[in-house]
Image (cartoon, helix red, strand yellow):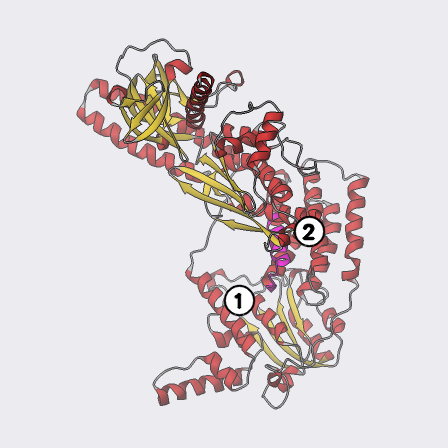
Amino acid sequence: MNLDGALQTFFAEAEDLLNSMEAALLRLDEGEKDMETINEIFRAAHTIKGSAGLFGLNDIVSFTHIVENVLDRARDEKITLSSDLLSILLPCRDHIAVLVENAMHERVNDEACLAQGQALLDALKPWLDAAVPVAAKQGNNATAGFFDGNTGLASDRDAWHISVRFGPDLLRNGMDPFSILRFLRTLGEITHITTITDHLPEFNDFDPEQLYLGFEITLSSNASQQQIEDAFMFVREESSIKIIPPRSNVNAFVNLIQSLPENAQRLGEILVKSHAISYQELEAALATQKNQAKALGKVGMLGDILIEEQAVAPEIVNAALDKQKKNSEKKSSPENRFIRVDAERLDKLINLIGELVINRQRVDLLASKMGNPTLIEAVTSMGNFTEAIRDAALTLRMVPIGDTFQKFKRVVRDTAKSLNKEIELEIEGAETELDRSMVEKLNDPLMHIVRNAMDHGIESIAVRQARNKPDSGTIKLTARHDAGNIVIGIHDDGGGLDVEKIRKKAIANGLIEEGVHLSRQELFQLIFHPGLSTAEQVTNLSGRGVGMDVVKRNIEELQGGIEIESEMGVGTSLSIRLPLTLAIIDGFHVTAGNIDFIVPQNTILECVDLNSLSHVQGQNCVNLRGDQVPYIRLREIFSLQPGRHSREKIVVVQFGEKRAGIVVDELHGEIQTVVKPMGPIFQALKGIGGSSLLGTGAVALILDIQQLISFAINREHLRNNAFSVNIQEQE
């Protein structure tokens, strides 16, 4: 039996489960105390262990089994997931990831790897050996009346409560669940039992070998918790079992309600299932509710009635209401269905659709030449369907950037501890989508920027206190769509960039000359030059001047740009602007010097005749409704031969807040463009972001608008600086 396909599926699912596990651990570290989060972590570890066992990956099984035991004790409230324990569980999650990666690449786990795993298991031992915490004898003043006295629940509070959801394959594996219930009777008296039938299927779907039932049991017994747990020894692995000791506090029942797997829609049903109240108390409360409706003409809230009758604590009612709300939302929202698709297959589909777009352009040209109205109408209709198919296919490659942002929570947490700083990470716009291929290439640039912000941006606690800032610094990651682009922001409330220090460092490195005037934005851009760093000292994270130049280069390779805004003592903001996709774009076909070019459609503001605009004397600038817009000629910067048309046109383009004009010889109109990457020999060519095939078979070059705008603006600044220096020399 060939299990290669199943093994690859395990590796892919293990990666997803480990990501979910890390995210849940970080939520707990941030203060979230939801029992469902602990269950999520346990399920991830349990699934990885079980699946690894199927393929004989014993190192993964043995290590994960110990981690699972610790998590199981946390689920049973025997231990607390404290900050110290979470600081061990996070590296445990990382070690599982290493073991999975080694298995995926068929690498043997060497002695160092196994020793690291054993060190983590040794660190977990105190929590495996921890004693079971003693249950509270009495609630606080607000809830004490619900746990003692003659409230109708006294006998239940003096008994054990056992919540059991047996595994569905229990019968198939030869186990009899009723034998377990009979064994419990030998330990004491079962005073109440509720059979949970929520998972029973329709008659035609019923499988007699599958177990669908769960039980809520009240056991009056003097047995120890270990004796009761031993009753479920042989079914615990595949079952969900929660045991609440006698006279437990409110939190135990709140956690039980939150973890109930059923989708009960009614408050009373939830409370009864968790044995917070009995059926008799529910019926009495419903009768009171009915009498109030007759007497007052309005229906009272069941939860308020139960609290007034001291049948249940307010905290338990609130937990049941939250559970009811979640169940209602789950029922009303459509079920999401996903199918795992190989990324290579998706890329192949996009390439085929790209070829379809190119051939559609050829058909358009042939139809227009023939001039047959019926054919032109059919081709136009086919073109509309082609565009719809293109858009639908590109949507398949769009993924939310939130998954990438979430990875930085762990980075910020660990780095802040190593720097002895307090740093919080905020995320905004996590649902914003962009092309999957771009997400993968964004990880390294974002990592450089976030590390720099933590190391040199956010001040130490002492410095922040001296500046009357909160002890905890903040890094904020944002994402939003803007005019066909995605804008990613990285903001920190640290010390900001020192403009004068950047200037002096740039002069010392020979990047600029003394006396040359640069704007604040131009000075900020200098930090992207190799070797330029204003850090006072080199650290393990940054300060060597290596990294920010790589950041800019990687962003420009994605046809994007990066801008900086900073204020001393307030903080720094970096904005990365990228196209949504690099596969198929809407473009505008132009010609310069008999060479075809494509201008991305979303960057174009307008197209006008160059001679119709007034020029700024001595400069390559035009006056466009009161604004001076610098321009460049494609024929000049690419050394092209003059075109056939003498009347030049200017295409006004914008990238972010910057505008410039591109002078061409001829305008042809809108066109769908399949982006083809340039070969290695053309990688150093500036101003060109790719190539494409036209319907005629000719090759068109796709312009890199961000680089061309920067070139036009910088050239005018240099011209103005040279003019200013010349005036000063004459004076």
Q: Which residue is mark 2?
A: 90
Q: Position of residue 431 (x, y in %)?
A: 47, 48
Across the whole image, how many numbered discs are drawn on residues?
Answer: 2
In this view of the protein, can residue 468 be seen by the observer? Answer: yes
Q: Position of residue 219 (x, y in %)?
A: 67, 79
Q: Is 596 situated left or right of 118 in this image?
A: left
Which residue shows up at 59% across the image and 72% down it? 254
Which residue shows up at 39% across the image and 14% down it? 636
Q: Which residue is mark 1?
A: 262
Above or below, 317 relative to 621: below
- Say which amino acid is labelled 2: Leu
- Residue 80: mark in rendering: none
Residue 32 lies within the magenta run: yes
Callout 2 touching callout 1 (CB < 8 Å) = no
SS at circle 2: helix
The residue mark sitting in front, 2 or 1, is 2
Gap in angstroms between the C-alphas marked 2 and 1: 30 Å
Above or below, 179 relative to 47: below
Which residue shows up at 28% across the image and 17% down it? 648
- Say which amino acid is labelled 1: Glu
| Quadrant in which the C terminus appears | top left
**Residue density around tag 2, few if under 14, some if 14–19, many if 20 or more, within 10 Å:** some
Q: Earlier in the sequence, mark 2 or mark 1?
A: 2
Residues rendered magenta in the picture: 19-35
Residue 659 lies within the magenta run: no
SS at circle 1: loop
Give the camera-side residue of 30 and 117.
Answer: 30
In this view of the protein, can residue 550 be seen by the observer? Answer: no
**Residue density around tag 1, few if under 14, some if 14–19, many if 20 or more, within 10 Å:** some
Q: Is 638 situated left or right of 649 in this image?
A: right
Give the quadrant of residue 313: bottom right
